[in-house]
Image (cartoon, rainbow, N blue to C red):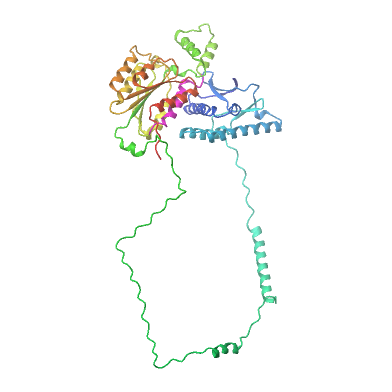
Amino acid sequence: MQRITRIAFDYNNPEKISLLEQYHSLLLLLKSHLTDRTFSILASPRLIDNNQYLGWYTNLEGQPLLLDSIAHKSHKNKITKTLQTRINDIENAIKLMPLSDEERSLVSAWLPRIKSLGNQIYVINDEPVIVNTFEEPVLPAAAPVIPPKPFWRWWHFLILALLLVGLLGILWYLFCPFGKQKTVVPDPMAIIAPAVIVKKPKPTPEAVTEPKDPVPEEPTPIATSEPKPEPVPESPLAPKVKNPPNCITKEDMNKDPNPSKMAIVFDNSLSMTVTLNESPSAVEQYFQYLTYGYGRNMSEQERIKYEKRMTRLPTRLSSSKSVATSSIDKIQPNIGISLVTLTNCPAANVSPFYNYSNRASLKHKIKQLTPTAAGGGGTPLYNGLEKASKMLDGVKRDDYILIISDGEDNCTKRNICTLANYIAAQKPRLKINIVDIAGEHKIDCIANATGGKVYIAQSPKDMIKQMNKAVSSLKINRPVCQ
């Protein structure tokens, strides 16, 4: 993978950081649905040079040059046409992708940015590559509106034509002899003759015509009760909603006076800043380097380069944030969610429970998580699990804990497996699932003791798949029936 260019980047600007994380989420979402050639138009950004610059990289090989620097007009038009074709392919692929509301919102927000005229377009072996500026999209100028010709310019011709046709019709009617009917004078004998032929009987004086009795009208029945309205037949064209078999009705949710609750234990330690683009052995070597100071024979420039390579995006943290916020939308509306954050020793931070209407605030809180070296860092998993279990019932109702972490507790020597067994005995209806990013199986005992499962995720693609499985197996992602 080669670097195309680098652009100055304000790392202290939260809006820029948010846009960078959104763009990585977009690339992660699109990659599995696009061909390599179509996906190649989207350059991949990485923070470089002590986070002062954003480097843009591509898998294409060759010398990159700006599209605007191409002097040959036909060649430039050919590249531009290829670029538009690739963008159209992306739009067509998006129409076929099964997207959640949040994913659809992300794609809708970024499509104008991808098509923005403010982006830098590079060309590598006649293949266009978009370097996004993360600025407000510059849309193509609207085509000039050509005002219609004034109506009066031709309307009077139409009026004159109609008047002329009318005048011709009048002249035809007055002077044309054809078609005029002659006036027929009635023959008086033709009127008298029938009267002579018809014989009328003379009435006798005795004959008296009796008036006929009028036919009595049928009485109008008096309504003793209001008429029943005829049933309106159901329209065969009315759409029928087909609900999934496992959906939950709003009535069922409202009837439950004590719905389940859930706690997400989220690892926000410094170890989560490691990239997902390196092998587990390379990551372990990096941790050894941080712990024991290996690599003392490296020059300062080599150390900086090594550390930047091992912390480039996507990191464990950035991918965990993305999939966690996406998974929250799939959890049933009647389930309250609390966030337990593992940032540094000795204790975890616990939030109140967020209801459905406040889940946007919960997702914002997750997106803003940033590891810190204050207090020496660390992963207080024991304390976080202990606090999370105390917040939940797990006896009279089914409650859940989802742990997202890359390792074991390094803040205490207390045995976390013993704690898990105690929780299982005290709260038999509390189930704990784990998304293990490191894949070292060091905390499997927590899930095993509580009837939960462990899901290994060591790549961005695995993160999405395993997080969905972890939430699905808790059986708290039933959709609401329509």
Q: Quadrant of the C terminus?
A: top left
| Position above or below: 394 against 288 | below
Answer with the quarter of the image where residue 68 lies. Answer: top right
Q: Tell me which residue sits at (64%, 53%) in the image.
A: 149
Q: Quadrant of the N terminus?
A: top right
Residue interval drawn in magenta: 312-332
Answer with the quarter of the image where residue 203 lies. Answer: bottom left
Answer with the quarter of the image where residue 69 lies. Answer: top right
Indicate the position of residue 421 as horizontal and vertical percent values: 31, 17
| Main secondary structure type of the part rendered in magenta | helix
Q: Is residue 173 visible?
A: yes
Indicate the position of residue 480 as horizontal and vertical percent values: 39, 37
Q: Is residue 2 magenta?
A: no
| Position above or below: 88 against 224 | above
| Position above or below: 346 against 41 | above
Indicate the position of residue 434 as horizontal and vertical percent values: 40, 21
Indicate the position of residue 345 as horizontal and vertical percent values: 36, 16
Horizontal side of 172 relative to 417 (left or right) equals right
Horizontal side of 31 relative to 349 (left or right) equals right
Horizontal side of 436 relative to 278 (left or right) equals left
Q: Tell me which residue sits at (54%, 31%) in the image.
A: 135
Q: Tell me which residue sits at (46%, 21%) in the image.
A: 457
Horizontal side of 89 relative to 392 (left or right) equals right
Identify which residue, 236 or 249, lies in the foreground: 236
